[in-house]
Structure formats: structure tokens, C-alpha cells
Image (cartoon, helix red, strand yellow):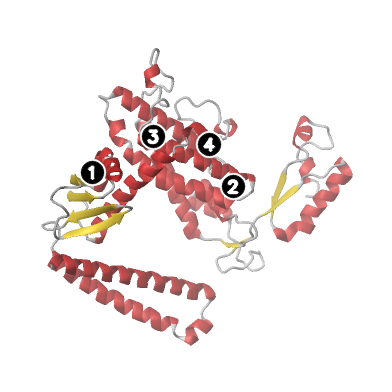
């Protein structure tokens, strides 16, 4: 194995591959074989090739079993990666290892996290299916004489926002990869793809994609969507190579393998902090409306009325411009901005920046029945919290139970306590609304 850096390239024959790829740039390994393998490769490289095989060594985390023990055949605690790949998918397993790869920190192999990254892969796959359904018949080349359809001359605020965010994600991902912070790169992409591209951008552009009567607007939306998706796939490719290659082959205008496609570079002309600030306000407002619905147990299919009040005219103008998105994504039937009638009575309230959000609930929920439901839930959860507190106060349990079990119980108690506080706050709000 000490000959590996050059024997794999055709040595002792002077092959083109040997000339091109030796020496390499970096070796990825664990700390426990630095002398047994890494040092020997250095010695053999200098002896046979007259040059060190690499100048940088990335020491990744040591993957341990769920109990924190080093895996070994003698202990019988080896987790077969092939079984995990069969169960969760190769891409999900690979993404998991990248997300675990914090320098100098050992990690415990968690199937729960691997399952989470499988869900992420499924999210990407379904987002691409949605995209392809809405790109049917789309020609990425601009039509003859169609200069007015150039999607980058006049982007909508939503398009300017996603393009601006994409540039920042490209910068952060490239910086993380250049410094071998693979876990940070994986997390950056996870957060952007799941929470911004899928959860927000695709939802925000649906009206434009579905409106086949407005051909120019729809084509622009398709063009930007294709451009963003192309960049997302290339950014993800080192982490999920099989899925991204499969999707890439179906991408309109894509040529060859994604493996040889250029990795995205930031395009500063698309930086747009104003669009980002505007969309942050819009998304925060929609989120607040959704939170009120969830906290107040408003039925999912019920359309509500919302009043927005703010002393800042600019904030109200911004939300008015995005009225359609707020109504669709918040399931709002009537949206009132700085109504002359003032805030309504018996309304739940939330605050986003300088904007007060009111949602009248009379006739939507039964305050008396909701109060009874909350009282029952508070009683049940209160007993569970008391039981968990007694357990965590038991010195015998703390001394004898494995650290993993104690940590799990502590996390469970914290989650239950936080939920109890939220239920108490909700009960107080219902009491106020009941008068």
C-alpha cells in the first residue's frame, strides 16, 4: 500500500497518467494510520519517484459505532457500509459522511442522520420532477428576435432574490471545499436547497409557471429556474454523484456528463441585497401567518383574514407588492394593509420587524373547546415533565446509565419543557381572546 500513489498510475512504466497525476495535491485519511501508511507513502515516493506524493494531508474524523467505540472486527461492532447504502442509498450515505467530516472530531455513525439525508435526496429528486414537468417543451435557446425575453435584463424580485442567494451559496461552498471544510459545504447546500430553493422559491414561482397565457413571463421564470437548478446540481455533484448525474442527463440543454461540467463560479452581477431584504420580510410574514394558524389550531383548509399594520410605509408597500404570494402560501382570503378600521378585536397577533400581523379568529375556532383541549394536553404533558425530572434527579440512574442514555433523556426533558411553556403561552392567548 505504500506504493499506492504511483503504482495505481502504471508505475514503473512512464505512463501519461503517471506524468499527469503524480504528485497529487492532497491525501485524505484518518489519524490512526499516519505512521503505518502515510509516512511510508512519503518514503516510497521520495525513494522511487524522487518527489513526495502529496504536500497536504486531510485528517478526517474517525467514524465510531453508536456507542462511541472504534469499530473493529474483534469487537464485532463493525457497521457494513454496503448494508447502509442498500438501506438508505449510496448518495445519502456519501452526503452523510461529508456532513460528518469535521476536522479533528470523531463522529458516531447515526442511522437517524443518514435517514435524514435520504429524505434530502428524495426532496431534491421530487423538486427536479416538478421542474421537468414545468419545463416540457421549453427550449433553453432564446427564440429568434426575442431579445425582450432575456431573463437577466429585468428579473422579478423573487428571481433576483434566488439568483443573489445562489451567488452567496456558491462562494460559501467553494470556500469550504478549498479549506477542506466538507461538513460546512454540505450544510450550506442542505440549507439552501431544502429551505430556500425547494420550500420557498419553487412555491413562489408556481403562479408564473402555471400561467400559460402569459408566455413571456412564463418563459423568463423557466429560464431562471433552469439556470438555478443547473447550478444546484453541479454544486451537489461531489456529494451526491449518482442522483445528480441521472438528473443532469434529463436537463434541457445539458451536454455530456455533469462530472466534466464546470463547477459554478459566483457571478457578482447577480448580487442583490435589496431583493434579499425584501424577500426576507415577505417570507417572515408568511411564516408568522403560518405559525399563528398552527399555534391556534386553525384547520389547514380554512381561509383566513389577515390585517397588516405598520408605521413604515415602505414595509406595507413591499408586502402589498407580494400580496398574491402571501395569500396563496398563507391561505389568506382577505389581506388588509394599514386598514383605516384599525386592528380587529379577538385576533391573534404576531410581529415581524416593524409590521404587526393580526388574524381574527371569531367563527374560525371554538375558543371554549380549544381551551378545554389545551387544559387536557397541559395536564398530560405536565405529568410527563414531572416524571422526567424525577428520573434526571435520580443519582442511581445518572451513575449507572450509559452517557448516551442520560444525554437522550436530558434532551427529551428539555424538549418537553419547551413544549409545555409554549402550550402555557397559547393557553394564555386563548384566555385573552375569550375576554
- The tag earlier along the polypeptide, 1 or 3, is 3
Side of 293 where 41 appears, left or right: right
- The tag earlier along the polypeptide, 2 or 4, is 2
Single out the mark in the foreground, 2 or 3: 3
Q: Position of residue 373 (x, y in %)?
A: 19, 69
**Figure check: 423 above or below 134:** below
Q: Which residue is mark 4?
A: 234
- The tag earlier along the polypeptide, 1 or 4, is 4
Single out the mark in the foreground, 3 or 4: 3
Per the model, the C-alpha gap separating discs 2 and 1 is: 38 Å
Per the model, the C-alpha gap separating discs 1 and 4 is: 34 Å
Given the current orientation, which residue lies at the most extreme top position?
145
- The tag earlier along the polypeptide, 2 or 1, is 2
Tag on residue 327? 1
Per the model, the C-alpha gap separating discs 1 and 3 is: 19 Å
Per the model, the C-alpha gap separating discs 2 and 4 is: 15 Å
Q: Position of residue 245 (x, y in %)?
A: 52, 35
Residue 367, picture quadrant: bottom left
Crowd tier of the residue under label 3, counting other residues whose Cα lies within 10 Å: few below 14, some 14–19, many 20 or above: many
Tag on residue 159? 3
Per the model, the C-alpha gap separating discs 3 and 4 is: 20 Å
**Figure check: 180 above or below 34:** above
Q: Which residue is mark 2?
A: 176
Mark count: 4
Single out the mark in the foreground, 2 or 4: 2
Per the model, the C-alpha gap separating discs 2 and 3 is: 26 Å
Q: Marks 4 and 2: in contact by CB < 8 Å?
A: no
Amino acid at each position: 500500500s505504500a506504493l499506492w500513489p504511483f503504482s495505481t498510475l502504471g508505475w514503473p512504466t512512464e505512463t501519461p497518467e503517471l506524468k499527469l497525476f503524480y504528485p497529487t495535491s492532497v491525501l485524505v485519511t484518518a489519524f490512526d494510520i499516519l505512521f503505518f501508511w502515510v509516512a511510508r507513502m512519503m518514503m516510497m515516493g521520495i525513494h522511487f519517484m524522487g518527489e513526495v506524493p502529496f504536500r497536504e494531508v486531510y485528517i478526517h474524523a474517525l467514524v465510531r459505532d453508536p456507542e462511541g467505540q472504534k469499530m473493529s472486527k474483534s469487537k464485532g461492532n463493525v457497521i457494513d457500509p454496503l448494508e447502509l447504502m442498500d438501506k438508505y442509498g449510496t448518495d445519502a450515505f456519501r452526503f452523510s459522511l461529508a456532513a460528518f467530516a469535521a476536522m479533528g472530531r470523531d463522529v458516531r455513525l447515526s442511522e437517524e442522520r443518514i435517514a435524514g439525508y435520504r429524505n434530502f435526496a428524495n426532496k431534491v429528486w421530487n423538486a427536479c420532477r416538478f421542474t421537468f414537468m414545468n419545463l416540457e417543451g421549453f427550449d433553453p435557446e432564446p427564440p429568434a428576435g426575442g431579445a425582450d425575453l432575456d431573463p437577466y435584463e429585468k428579473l422579478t424580485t423573487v428571481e433576483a432574490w434566488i439568483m443573489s442567494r445562489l451567488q452567496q451559496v456558491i462562494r460559501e461552498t467553494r470556500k469550504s471545499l478549498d479549506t477542506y471544510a466538507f461538513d460546512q459545504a454540505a450544510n450550506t447546500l442542505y440549507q439552501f436547497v431544502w429551505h430556500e430553493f425547494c420550500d420557498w422559491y419553487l412555491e413562489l414561482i408556481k403562479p408564473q409557471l402555471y400561467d400559460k397565457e402569459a408566455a413571456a413571463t412564463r418563459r423568463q421564470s423557466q429560464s431562471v429556474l433552469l439556470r438555478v437548478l443547473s447550478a444546484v446540481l453541479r454544486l451537489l455533484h461531489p456529494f451526491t454523484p449518482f442522483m445528480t448525474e441521472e438528473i443532469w442527463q434529463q436537463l434541457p440543454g445539458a451536454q455530456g456528463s455533469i462530472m466534466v461540467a464546470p463547477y459554478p463560479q459566483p457571478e457578482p452581477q447577480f448580487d442583490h441585497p435589496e431583493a434579499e431584504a425584501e424577500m426576507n420580510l415577505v417570507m417572515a410574514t408568511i411564516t408568522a401567518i403560518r405559525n399563528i394558524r398552527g399555534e391556534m389550531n386553525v384547520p389547514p383548509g380554512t381561509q383566513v383574514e389577515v390585517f397588516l399594520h405598520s408605521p413604515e410605509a415602505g414595509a406595507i408597500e413591499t408586502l402589498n407588492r407580494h400580496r398574491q404570494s402571501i395569500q396563496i402560501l398563507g391561505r389568506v382570503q382577505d389581506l388588509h394593509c394599514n386598514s383605516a378600521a384599525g386592528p380587529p378585536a379577538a385576533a391573534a397577533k404576531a410581529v415581524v420587524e416593524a409590521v404587526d400581523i393580526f388574524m381574527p379568529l371569531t367563527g374560525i375556532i371554538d375558543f371554549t373547546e380549544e381551551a378545554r383541549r389545551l387544559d387536557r394536553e397541559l395536564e398530560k404533558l405536565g405529568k410527563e415533565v414531572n416524571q422526567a425530572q424525577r428520573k434526571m434527579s435520580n443519582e442511581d440512574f445518572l451513575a449507572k446509565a450509559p452517557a448516551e442514555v442520560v444525554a437522550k433523556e436530558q434532551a427529551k426533558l428539555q424538549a418537553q419543557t419547551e413544549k409545555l411553556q409554549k402550550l402555557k403561552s397559547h393557553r394564555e392567548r386563548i384566555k385573552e381572546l375569550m375576554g
